[in-house]
Image: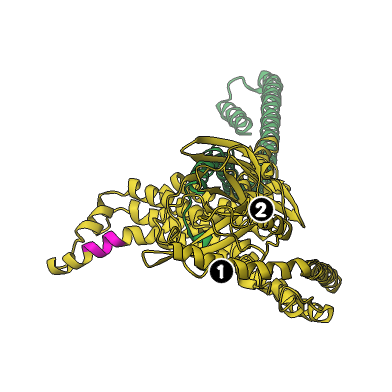
């Protein structure tokens, strides 16, 4: 007869009321003190991990960017350096040339002025010589003239010719 | 390492099996030893039958001519003998109890059914019980006491009646006779009888008191008599074995989970550790495989309930797997418990149902009108059938598991046990039974462990599916 009455299958008010009470309390307290805080903490941690991963990716990207920038900068610097070197070389060359030209010019000017000076001196000497020669000729001529000039036209022309010859020289 | 573990387990199982089998033997020996009193009973039985037919003839009582005793556990010889001798024929309108059972054949089915029952005390071993608080309500008012007040006359039976309440096989019952003395009264043996009334066979328990056989009422149940229960003279709101198991599971899990939750605060920003990492995996699984796929952005709202239902069922399933105190309760295998859980899911589904949900139940859009007329009753029935299946599935799975386990353990007694009450079983038979029972029981326990998780998960995922149907937005 025990078989006929299947006790676990029969709903009992006492057990049902206790189940309602205990399960409600279980639901309430576990949600409040366990499930909600744990779910929140898990979500926060997942967000943290996701953020960390995102940040790492971003940092890696930035690193790559920075690296390429560095490379670019380096390349630029290298080019700049070679440019500067080239420019410096050119400048030095130009300077050298310029200096050389200047020196040449100065030399030429000096030579020129020396030549001019020589010419001037020569002219001066010539003038002096001419004057001296004239004086001397005049003296000679005077002496001659004093002797022969008295009335001789031919002689006078001759003397004149002599004087012109001297001038030409 | 694995072989060693299996060896140790097998050894423990075998030892336990043989120990238990010998306990059974001692029972049989006990029966053997009191054979004299048995004979005496047999004689009583004959007398009694005569008395009984006499009673029936008098027409004072409506008892059926046949009175069966199905009580295989209770011997109660001493009480019976004394009481019978003293009070024979004192009161004509009380027939005498047949409590000293004539047949003691081991009945695995009865043992299994007894073990999956709720009880008002917690069996430890032998005749030792953990007393549980009893809260009983009758027309006389509330009665609070410990189950130990009933005393112990063996096999979970109480030795005393307290305010007309008695303890039969670990369950509180009430003496129907209103003239029975209140307070603590020593009573005799317990039996089980059937009486026929209006063509219906009504089984009931009996207790012997001063030679009279008194009818007992079982606690009130809500089946309306359909399943053999019904409203009787009292209600039992006790902390029973099942209620105790629920409270214990609650306390254990609350401690575990709050500890884990604290870990997220004290060890913030660190990797999970210990119990935290154990529970976190399961919580994440329920969230990502159950709540989110079904409920999407509304998952957070229902997640605490889904987790509660999952862990409540899982905890009780696992606690019920432990074959001794404080486990062994058949909590999730009680319809009362699974019904309450299913009702919670039903209420949550119903109060969260949106326009779309009700529209699909009451007047399904996009189908011809004549189909709607058929569909609407089906959908309305479906509303209730869904939680009904939840309730029955969990109940049936867990109860079936418990029964199969007990039947397998029973092999020890069936093979080695006594064919009748007066014959002792054989050691050889019980060893053979143990050899058979151990691998089968181990296998079944492993399966049951799986079932414990699967059923908790199934209840949880189906609840999520019902909530999902209730909160789903129209997507036409």
Viewer can see residue B198: yes
Gap in Å between the C-alphas at discs 1 and 2?
22 Å
Residue A129 sits in which quadrant? top right
Res. B156 in view? no
- Residue mark closest to the camera, 1 vs 2: 1
Where is residue B470? Give x, y as percent.
Answer: 34, 53
Does the segment drawn in magenta span residue B378?
A: yes
Query: Where is A129 relative to B439, above or below?
Result: above
The residue positioned 25% from the left and 49% from the top of the image is B355
Q: Is residue B435 or residue B266 the one in the foreground?
A: B435
Residue B279: horizontal and vertical position, in percent?
64, 50
Residue B12 part of the magenta-drawn span: no
Q: Which residues are magenta?
A: B376-381
Badge 2 marks a residue whose secondary structure is: loop
Relative to B468, is B2 on the left or the right? right
Horizontally, residue B94 falls left or right of residue B32, namely: left
Tell me the chief SS of the magenta region. Answer: helix
Front residue of B360 and B104: B104
Q: Which residue is mark 1?
A: B50
Same chain for labels 1 and 2? Say yes or no.
yes
Q: Do tag 1 and tag 2 residues touch (Cβ < 8 Å)?
A: no
Residue B357: image tag: none
- Which chain is disc 2 placed on? B
Residue B391 vs A35, above or below: the answer is below
Q: Chain of mark 1?
A: B
Task: Looking at the picture, tell me which residue is in the foreground, B111 or B60.
Answer: B60
Query: What colour denotes chain B?
Result: yellow
Q: Colour of chain A?
A: green
Find residue B188 and name its label.
2
Q: Determine the image quadrant of residue B23.
A: bottom right
Q: Earlier in the sequence, mark 1 or mark 2?
A: 1
């Amino acid at each position: 007869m025990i078989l006929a009455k299947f006790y676990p299958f029969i709903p009992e008010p006492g057990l049902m009321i206790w189940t309602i009470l205990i399960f409600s309390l279980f639901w309430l307290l576990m949600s409040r003190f366990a499930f909600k805080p744990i779910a929140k903490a898990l979500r926060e941690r997942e967000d943290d991990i996701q953020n960390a991963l995102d940040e790492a990716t971003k940092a890696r990207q930035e690193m790559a960017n920075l690296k390429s920038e560095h490379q670019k900068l380096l390349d630029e610097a290298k080019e700049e350096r070679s440019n500067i070197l080239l420019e410096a070389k050119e400048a030095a060359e130009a300077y050298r040339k310029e200096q050389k030209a200047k020196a040449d010019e100065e030399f030429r000017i000096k030579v020129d002025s020396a030549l001019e000076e020589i010419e001037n001196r020569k002219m001066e000497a010539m003038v002096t010589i001419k004057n001296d020669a004239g004086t001397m000729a005049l003296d000679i001529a005077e002496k001659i003239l004093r002797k022969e000039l008295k009335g001789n036209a031919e002689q006078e022309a001759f003397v004149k010719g002599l004087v012109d010859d001297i001038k030409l020289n | 390492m694995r072989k060693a573990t299996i060896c140790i387990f097998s050894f423990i199982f075998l030892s336990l099996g043989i120990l238990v089998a010998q306990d059974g033997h001692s029972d049989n020996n006990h029966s053997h030893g009191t054979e004299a009193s048995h004979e005496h009973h047999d004689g009583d039985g004959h007398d009694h039958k005569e008395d009984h037919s006499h009673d029936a003839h008098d027409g004072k009582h409506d008892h059926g001519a046949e009175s069966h005793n199905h009580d295989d556990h209770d011997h109660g010889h001493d009480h019976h003998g004394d009481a019978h001798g003293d009070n024979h024929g004192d009161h004509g309108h009380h027939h005498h109890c047949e409590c000293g059972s004539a047949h003691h054949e081991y009945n695995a089915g009865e043992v299994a059914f007894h073990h999956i029952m709720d009880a008002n005390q917690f069996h430890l071993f032998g005749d030792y019980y953990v007393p549980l608080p009893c809260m009983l309500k009758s027309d006389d008012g509330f009665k609070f006491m410990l189950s130990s007040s009933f005393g112990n006359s063996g096999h979970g039976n109480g030795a005393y009646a307290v305010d007309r309440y008695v303890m039969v096989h670990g369950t509180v019952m009430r003496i129907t006779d209103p003239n029975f003395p209140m307070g603590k009264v020593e009573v005799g043996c317990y039996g089980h009888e059937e009486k026929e009334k209006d063509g219906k066979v009504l089984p009931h328990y009996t207790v012997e008191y001063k030679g009279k056989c008194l009818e007992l009422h079982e606690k009130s149940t809500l089946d309306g008599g359909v399943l053999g229960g019904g409203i009787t003279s009292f209600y039992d709101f006790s902390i029973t074995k099942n209620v105790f198991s629920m409270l214990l599971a609650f306390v254990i899990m609350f401690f575990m989970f709050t500890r884990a939750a604290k870990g997220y605060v004290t060890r913030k920003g660190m990797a999970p550790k210990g119990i935290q990492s154990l529970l976190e995996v399961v919580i994440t699984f329920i969230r990502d495989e159950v709540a989110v796929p079904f409920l999407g952005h509304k998952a957070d709202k229902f997640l605490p309930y889904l987790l509660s239902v999952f862990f409540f069922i899982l905890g009780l399933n696992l606690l019920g797997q432990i074959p001794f105190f404080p486990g062994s309760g058949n909590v999730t295998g009680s319809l009362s418990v699974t019904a309450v859980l299913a009702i919670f899911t039903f209420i949550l589904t119903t109060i969260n149902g949106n326009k779309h949900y009700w529209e699909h139940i009451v007047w399904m859009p996009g189908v011809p009108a004549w189909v709607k007329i058929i569909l609407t009753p089906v959908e309305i029935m479906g509303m209730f059938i869904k939680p009904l299946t939840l309730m029955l599935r969990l109940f049936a799975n867990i109860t079936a598991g418990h029964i199969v386990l007990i039947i397998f353990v029973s092999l020890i007694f069936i093979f080695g046990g006594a064919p009748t009450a007066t014959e002792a079983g054989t050691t050889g038979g019980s060893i053979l039974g143990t050899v058979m029972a151990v691998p089968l029981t181990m296998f079944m326990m492993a399966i049951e462990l799986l079932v414990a998780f699967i059923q908790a998960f199934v209840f949880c995922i189906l609840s999520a599916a019902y909530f999902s149907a209730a909160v789903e937005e129209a997507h036409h």
